[in-house]
Amino acid sequence: MTRLGGRKTPIWVWIVLTLLVLLLLAAGGAFLYVRSLLGPAGGPAYTLEIKSGDSLPRIARTLQDKGIIKNADALRFIMRQDGTAGSLKEGFYDLNGKLTLQQVADKLAGPARIPTVGVTIPEGRRVKDLPAIFKKAGFDGAAIASELKNVSLSTYAQAKSATNLEGFVFPDTYEFRPKDSARTIVETLVKRMNTEFTPAHVAQAKALGLSVRDWVILASMVQAEAANDAEMPIIAGVFLNRLRDGIALGSDPTVAYGLGKDLPELDRSAGDFTKDTPYSTYTRQGLPAGPINNPGQAALLAVLSPERTLPDGRAALYFLHGLDGKIYVNADYPAHLRDIARYR
């Protein structure tokens, strides 16, 4: 037996020393093991989808199976320690095996990537056109059609003749979630339109003698008649002058809308322009019974800032589109007829 300081070492000292060495070796091994769990697992990229009702244990096991983490229990422990175990959100999380365990935990505690579907509504489309647009994007077209008849969704669409939200859904590109309801979708379109009705814009319309509804009706006509945005203030000016002077507006698109036709389907020889409907601006004075499409921002603003006079100062009362693609504006009917002969 070895002696320490010339004295024999008790056996219990050797036992304690041996135990200490073993404990240090065990602690070192445990440290290395825990450290290995915290590092990247090395698996491939993986997109995790968290759905309603998914639990952290199930998610952790999935990530372990996919090679994103090395140990499911370790992830659960870290998230409990961080206080984020109960903050899982529905959506998608883009992960990969190069992330450390803490980085994975931090990502799961952060915002989810919510999948969206882009839907574009072109300017000038009618309400009847919208269900097909949404159906093509993967939504329930019939449900959209039903909600578009809910006139109460828009404060400004209230009128005895209104049977749908024509004119009050804003043409734009929207991002919707695949599970969004038809009500949510239509409300979004209407709310976007309502942002155009600022106090300043409403005051401008009132100064022109137009209610909000009248403004939208006229903008829908401008939208339908104009070949481009630059023409819109000119056309708006002509219509406003004709309203002021008590001249029938004579807009072909209003006739088409009243007959349930598209513009190219109008047939003068069949008497389309003499058939009376609440929308015809040939058989009736003033604005049609309601909007004939859903106008965009350019048309709405054109009505508020119209070009009402010709370069010589006379009021613009007539316009036509020539075969050369240009718009011709006149102050009197004989000049208008001459331009028809020249350019049409």
Image (cartoon, rainbow, N blue to C red):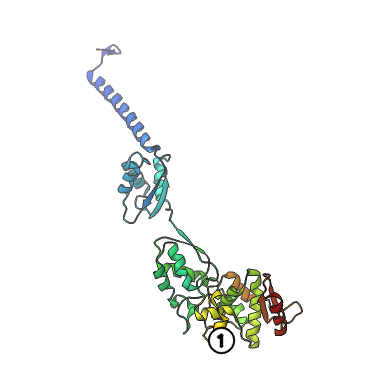
90 above or below 276?
Answer: above
Work out which quarter of the rendered image holds the N terminus and state it: top left
Most extreme residue toward the left is 11
Left or right of 145 on screen, residue 248: right
The image quadrant that residue 283 belongs to is bottom right
Most extreme residue toward the front is 269
Q: Residue at x 28, y 25 (%)?
A: 22
Left or right of 179 on screen, residue 328: right
Query: Taking the image as drawn, is residue 272 in sight?
Result: no
Label 1 crowd bin: few (<14), some (14–19), many (20+), radius 10 Å: few
Mark 1 residue type? Thr
Residue designated by label 1: 274
Task: Name the spot of residue 287 as percent of width and height, x first.
Answer: 57, 83
Task: Name the spot of residue 72 as percent of width and height, x first.
Answer: 32, 42
Q: Residue at x 33, y 44 (%)?
A: 77
Task: Name the spot of residue 286 as percent of width and height, x first.
Answer: 58, 86
Dot 1: what SS?
Answer: loop
Work out which quarter of the rendered image holds the C terminus and state it: bottom right
Query: Taking the image as drawn, is residue 268 in sight?
Result: yes
Task: Pick the residue in front: 170 or 71.
Answer: 170
Left or right of 325 on screen, residue 55: left
Task: Pick the residue in front: 189 or 241.
Answer: 241
The image quadrant that residue 318 belongs to is bottom right
